[in-house]
Amino acid sequence: MPKILIARNLPDNVVAEARALFDVDYRDSPAPMSRDEMVASLRDYDGVLPTLGDLYAADVFAEAGALRCRILANFGVGYNHIDVAAARAAGLTVTNTPGAVTDATADIAMTLMLMSARRAGEGERLVRAGGWQGWHPVQMLGLHLSGKTVGIVGMGRIGQAIARRCHFGFGMAVAYASRSEKALDFPATRHASPEALAAKVDVLVVAVPGGAETHHLIGEAVFAAMKPTAHFINIARGDVVHEAALIDALEKGVIAGAGLDVYEFEPAVPPRLMALENAVLLPHLGTAALEVREDIGRMAVANLRAFFAGEDVPNPV
């Protein structure tokens, strides 16, 4: 029976399902693995179920030397914490869990859009601080989303799910920037670049994968192109955005607000960002619903099961 490491605390049902199939060591901890633990995981286990924060960089594979591990079945769709090229060179298969995260992540994008546009975080802080003096006609006026234009940078599964919610739920016009034209079941206008898109929309949402190709894809030029009334939303990966440039844009009023679920140096959040009333900050809640996390875990276990059964893995990276 293959020996598997579950690298972080997961829902009980997922752990039980894995134990029924494999000899499982369960690292029941909320913290990511240390470098030494990652090196040992490659030497001591046939497969690992890692998570965001387990940084399998090229030098981790190099230090591990002769590897017992043959598969990294990542818990989550994003895998920029794994050097996939180094893993493949070492003979490992890498899988992820697309699909399971789509709707939950799109829902968080809508949460952030509404919170930022309608100044919900700022309003709640006002009430909790005892500073609210009662309703009046021009108090905390925000942006009405219905009928506005949303721009999606990256029109993959998650980008399309966000766009559908905006179009069918709020009557918003949809525009997007992506490497290729997409066949969509709703009307949308494609722009050549994030900068060109940014100039045309009321809300700009980034929904691209993390990694070297998208590092700092969104920076000063994109924020400068946005309308001063526009809002920026990030549910992708933190380092897709040049965080310092975003903070400058928010402090100077270049854009009206931002809603963030991820951060460039997560879990570190800059004090300048935390001080901003026009920033909505969530602690990476994108898929934080029990049934969603269970679905993600089951998909990761399914990848492991298929691999060790000699079948094609359902979700190779």
Image (cartoon, helix red, strand yellow):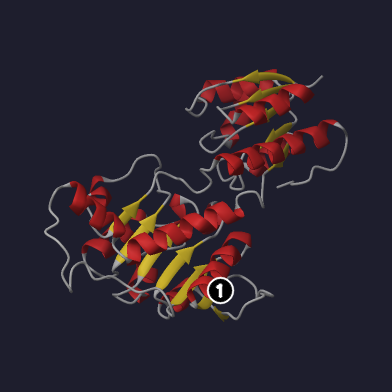
Q: Position of residue 2 (x, y in %)?
A: 79, 22
Task: Please tell me in which quadrant of the rendered image residue 47 appears.
Answer: top right
The answer to whether 261 is drawn above or below residue 4 in the figure is below
Task: Please tell me in which quadrant of the rendered image residue 307 appears.
Answer: top right
User: Relative to 228, is 73 on the left or the right?
Assistant: right
The answer to whether 182 is drawn above or below residue 261 in the figure is below
> How many residues crowd mark 1 within 10 Å: few (<14), some (14–19), many (20+)?
few
To which residue does mark 1 refer?
168
Name the quarter where the N terminus is drawn: top right
Residue beneath the point at 63% across and 22% down: 41
The answer to whether 253 is drawn above or below residue 104 in the figure is below
Identified by mark 1, the residue type is Phe
Q: Position of residue 219 (x, y in %)?
A: 39, 63
Residue beneath the point at 75% across and 38% down: 303
Q: Position of residue 134 (x, y in %)?
A: 14, 61
Q: Position of residue 252 (x, y in %)?
A: 21, 66
Closer to us: 204 or 299: 299
